[in-house]
Amino acid sequence: MDIKFENNKIYIKNPKNFDLAQTLDCGQAFRWSQNENGVWSGIAFGKYIELREKDGDIIISGSNQADFKNIWANYFDLSRNYAQIVKDVSVNETVRKAAEFSHGIRLLNQEPWEALCSFIISQNNNIPRIKGIVERLCENFGEKINGGYTFPSAETVAKLTVDDLTVIRSGFRAKYIIDAAQKVTSGEINLDVLKHADYDAAREKLMTIKGVGPKVADCVLLYGLSRIEAFPRDVWINRALDNLFDGKIPDCVGNYGGIVQQYIFHYIRNNQ
DNA sequence: TCCCAGGCTCTCT
DNA sequence: AGAGAGCATGGG
């Protein structure tokens, strides 16, 4: 992608396969919102930024060249060739339709701990409420910065009790959040190591955390540890597999399960 | 009001 | 190994 830095803004000129609304509001991340002027804002890696689309470009403000290079280029997965991937997986007609409907969704490479914590919260829950719980977690236990609150560190959460978490109204998930924070803080779970570990071994390790089963583990691997071969199966995906794919993932998906899963998730959720 | 939500744990066969 | 109840909370 063609990047330009001008007037304290970052211009992604004529972006390919990058739609802000599709990417930021498709249920993979829970801290992005759009205001009445169409401007998206959010916080990740302890930094607040704003993004908007104008004249076919994406404009990032509130950031700088160093952060773009060190954080956002990877966060928005800018080096991945989505056009080629879409072409490869579109051998299957239903996948092609889902990919077309989901055009512009990119996988966000999120912070491992934030992904772990967020997807623990996601279980047996709906997206609006997940967002509310995550936001209350940040407001109560994150660090105040310009624009909002950072996602609280595992170290911070590890010191809390179930009672302390009453304010975020996460229900039965509170004890799971704390167990995850404690295992990450103690080093019993090293998320950076799991990023490069054998997939099944990493998955098993994540599932030693209370409240982390197969689906949450796959989500952590996909959204937090950049493992695009992950294929999380939630109620929506299972429904789609049953109704559209004879119950199984088509072979043409190959190692891009995570991307196709995201396309199918978006497609099935917005088409009954 | 009732059903359900980007599931998992626990218990009982 | 597999099935089923229960779980906190609240959005639609």
Image (cartoon, coloured by chain):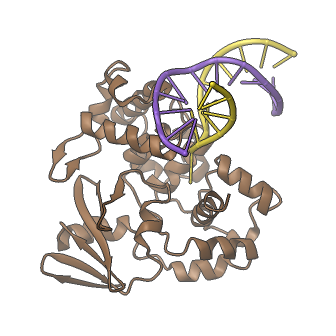
Chain colours: A brown, B yellow, C purple
Relative height, residue A225 to residue A89 (above, below): above
The reply, left or right, for residue A95 in relation to residue A20 is right
Identify the residue shown where x is 54% and y is 38%.
Answer: A125
Relative height, residue A267 to residue A209 (above, below): below
Identify the residue shown where x is 36% and y is 31%.
Answer: A168
Identify the residue shown where x is 30% and y is 24%.
Answer: A160
Quadrant housing the N terminus of chain A: bottom left
Relative height, residue A87 to residue A98 (above, below): below
Identify the residue shown where x is 54% and y is 63%.
Answer: A228
Q: Would you identify the image quadrant in which residue A50 lies?
A: bottom left
Q: Would you identify the image quadrant in which residue A78 lies?
A: bottom left
The reply, left or right, for residue A87 in relation to residue A83 is right
Q: Residue A139: horizontal and vertical position, in percent? A: 25, 38
Residue A96 visible in rendering:
yes
Q: Residue A61: horizontal and vertical position, in percent? A: 20, 70
| Tag count | 0
Q: Nearer the viewer, residue A44 or A14?
A: A14
Q: Nearer the viewer, residue A137 or A196?
A: A137
Quadrant housing the C terminus of chain A: bottom right
Q: Would you identify the image quadrant in which residue A201 lies?
A: top right
The reply, left or right, for residue A251 in relation to residue A2 is right
Residue A153 visible in rendering:
no
The residue at the far left in this view is A7
Q: Residue A66: horizontal and vertical position, in percent? A: 18, 70
Q: Residue A209: horizontal and vertical position, in percent? A: 50, 32
